[in-house]
Image (cartoon, grey):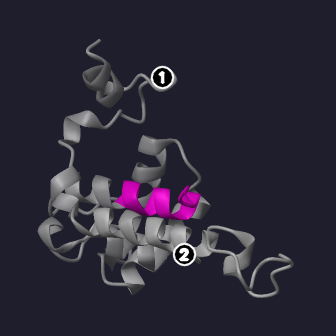
């Protein structure tokens, strides 16, 4: 299973907002930190605001912040809110062309795996995976592939 880029960005936005505490962060700042599209982040922030994970403030001094404590934001709920569907195979969607669709047992196994995946995400909150602000690469620092502070800590470099 692979999450969409949208869900990936949603989790990143929430991580960044959580690290900022009560400080409002901007889309520009977040896009620069992660080196991702500002336009795409605008859509992500909009959905996260509409679903109650973020609060936004308009205007020149505006930005966004978490709308609730990180301990109350379940990762599984965020993924369910941001994934368009969980069709793991063609037979999960309408109009399947599979000739064994009526008797195949693979969808049962895939559904079980999907339930386990979501259940694992539901066990964790944003507080469980939060990062300290220092773990985010400053936007002004040159990008050196995937060797930011988080990867160095994991690899022991």
Q: Is residue 63 visible?
A: no
First of labels 2, 1 by sequence position: 2
Q: CA distance from mark 2 to mark 1?
A: 47 Å
Q: Please name the residue shown 86% across and 78% down the image.
A: 97
**Element at label 2:** helix
Kindly identify the residue that appears in the image at 26 percent across and 63 percent down: 24
Whole-percent x and y of residue 127?
15, 58
34 relative position to 52: left or right: right
Towards the viewer: 86 or 100:
100
Quadrant (top left, top right, bottom left, bottom right) of the C terminus: top left
Is residue 46 shown above or below 154?
below
Return the x and y of residue 19 as percentages of the image width and height: 21, 51
Q: Crowding near pointer 2: few (<14 within 10 Å), some, many (20+)?
A: few
Q: Is residue 12 magenta?
A: yes
Magenta portion: prevailing SS class: helix
Q: Residue at x 22, y 51 (%)?
A: 129
- Which label is found at residue 142? 1
**Picture coordinates of residue 114 (x, y %)?**
46, 68
Q: Which residues are magenta?
A: 1-13
Q: Residue lying furthest front in this view?
A: 103
């Amino acid at each position: 299973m692979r999450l969409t880029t949208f869900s990936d960005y949603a989790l990143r936005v929430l991580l960044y907002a959580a690290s900022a505490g009560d400080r409002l962060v901007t889309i520009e700042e977040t896009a620069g930190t992660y080196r991702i599209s500002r336009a795409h982040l605008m859509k992500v922030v909009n959905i996260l605001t509409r679903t109650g994970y973020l609060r936004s403030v308009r205007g020149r001094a505006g930005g966004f912040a978490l709308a609730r404590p990180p301990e109350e934001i379940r990762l599984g709920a965020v993924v369910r809110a941001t994934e368009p569907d969980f069709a793991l195979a063609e037979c999960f969607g309408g109009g399947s062309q599979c000739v064994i669709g009526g008797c195949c047992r693979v969808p049962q196994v895939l559904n079980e795996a999907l339930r386990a995946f979501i259940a694992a995400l539901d066990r964790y909150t944003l507080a469980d995976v939060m990062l300290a602000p220092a773990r985010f690469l400053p936007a002004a620092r040159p990008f050196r592939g995937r060797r930011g502070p988080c990867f160095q800590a994991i690899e022991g470099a």
